[in-house]
Amino acid sequence: MTLALDAAAQDLLFREARTANTFSDEPVSDEQVQAIYDLVKYGPTAFNQQPLRIVLVRSEEGRARLVQHMAEGNQAKTAAAPLVAILAADNEFHEELPSQLPHFPQAKDLFFSERPVREASATLNGALQAAYFIIGVRAAGLAAGPMTGYNAEGINKEFFGDGEHSVLAVVNIGKPGEDAWFPRSPRLAYDEVVTTV
Amino acid sequence: MTLALDAAAQDLLFREARTANTFSDEPVSDEQVQAIYDLVKYGPTAFNQQPLRIVLVRSEEGRARLVQHMAEGNQAKTAAAPLVAILAADNEFHEELPSQLPHFPQAKDLFFSERPVREASATLNGALQAAYFIIGVRAAGLAAGPMTGYNAEGINKEFFGDGEHSVLAVVNIGKPGEDAWFPRSPRLAYDEVVTTV
């Protein structure tokens, strides 16, 4: 009774959605990714910063360049997924603040002039955006297989030569295949997570 | 045509949902927070780690202890919101991996024996969980007002004396009040965010 979101949407996004390890052959189109982005771009971040960058790995050559940096246990599924997206944080996101935060363009220099501050902010807010993206993949009726098992420095150098980007996750995307997931693991109980003061 | 999620749910979670700066007097119950957690606990993380901890600030005393650490521009709304939740990452989350990742309990020692590695993982995955929580607040028909403008060290010491927790965001929660939001700021275009290799 307490949720406004309908049961089918709850299932699609959270309750029945699962991290997929195998996928069908059905391709994922650019139109689908555009529809996902057009939805999740509205997710809130601090100062409306938008550090998330997405590299869609479509070519055979791109796939090979990525797979070599994946942890061994992630290589086969990353090689086989219909689409793979590299999610990264742009640590120079503050350059966009004057256009993206028009009512407070000074934020760029007031808060983000120092690189370590920017980097921490890009990591946190980029991760929020990565989570919105994962939800968006599910909203498109697709399964996401997010992974953090890789050589991050290798991916950063391979795909972002400028030293300004930090990979946050690599996400396999597609329709689930056979035996797509492991049994669901437990979750912490409410009382283990939530306290009241 | 490309999204499976129905339009009403898209609006509720992303398109019409806004970061609220004022709230009505309507209280937010523990049952609502339980329903939110019961939905978003299923959001995916690496190794099924669950570093997110939530402190609900309900007492007058608790509110005062929090407000003093908020940035000046966030104090009045944090003092006035029906409910405030402190979202933090537990940097010792790895202790729970043997119970939460029963098919691979060795992950605790294999991957998370070093504190800096744990902390980076808790920040990234805690931020993913924070985003799921914000989506969950909206799924409950409530408005979220997430903030990162505060003295983080002050909040960590005030609410988590053990040195093992790092605040990720403070979120005001309730039904939106009068003039609850600013005009929506722009978002980056698809081509500014997404590239293909």
Image (tube, coloured by chain):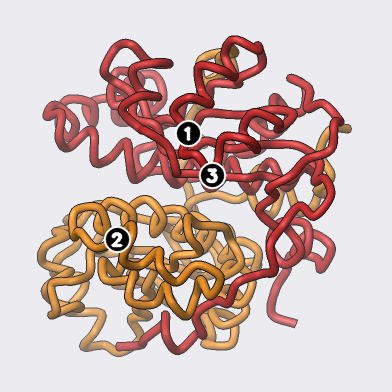
Chain colours: A orange, B red
Q: Secondary structure at mark 3?
A: helix
Reading the image, the residue beneath label 2 is A112
Q: For marks 3 and 2, give the CA distance.
A: 18 Å
Looking at the image, residue A85 sits to the left or right of residue B139; the answer is left
- The chain letter under disc 1 is B
Amino acid found under the numbered disc labelled 3:
Gly
State the image coordinates of residue A105 (x, y, percent, origin top left): 45, 71
The quarter of the picture where residue A63 lies is bottom left
Q: Secondary structure at mark 1?
A: loop
- The chain letter under disc 3 is B
The quarter of the picture where residue A157 lies is bottom left
- For the N terminus of chain B, which image quadrant? bottom right
Count of numbered tags? 3
Q: For marks 1 and 2, give the CA distance.
A: 19 Å
Reading the image, the residue beneath label 3 is B73
Amino acid found under the numbered disc labelled 1:
Met
Looking at the image, residue A38 sits to the left or right of residue A180; the answer is right
Amino acid found under the numbered disc labelled 2:
Phe
Residue at coordinates 23% horizontally, 26% vertically from top-left?
A: B108
Both on one chain, marks 1 and 2? no
Q: Nearer the viewer, mark 3 or mark 2?
A: 3
- How crowded pointer 3 is (Cα within 10 Å; few <14, some 14-19, many 20+) is rated as few
B77 shown above or below B160? below
The quarter of the picture where residue A139 lies is bottom right
Residue at coordinates 12% horizontally, 29% vertically from top-left?
A: B114
Looking at the image, residue B59 sits to the left or right of residue A62; the answer is right
Q: Are marks 3 and 2 in contact (CB under 8 Å)?
A: no
Q: For marks 1 and 3, give the CA distance.
A: 8 Å
A59 shown above or below A10? below
The answer, for residue B97, to whether it is visible in the render is: no
Residue at coordinates 60% horizontally, 21% vertically from top-left?
A: B56
Q: Secondary structure at mark 2?
A: helix
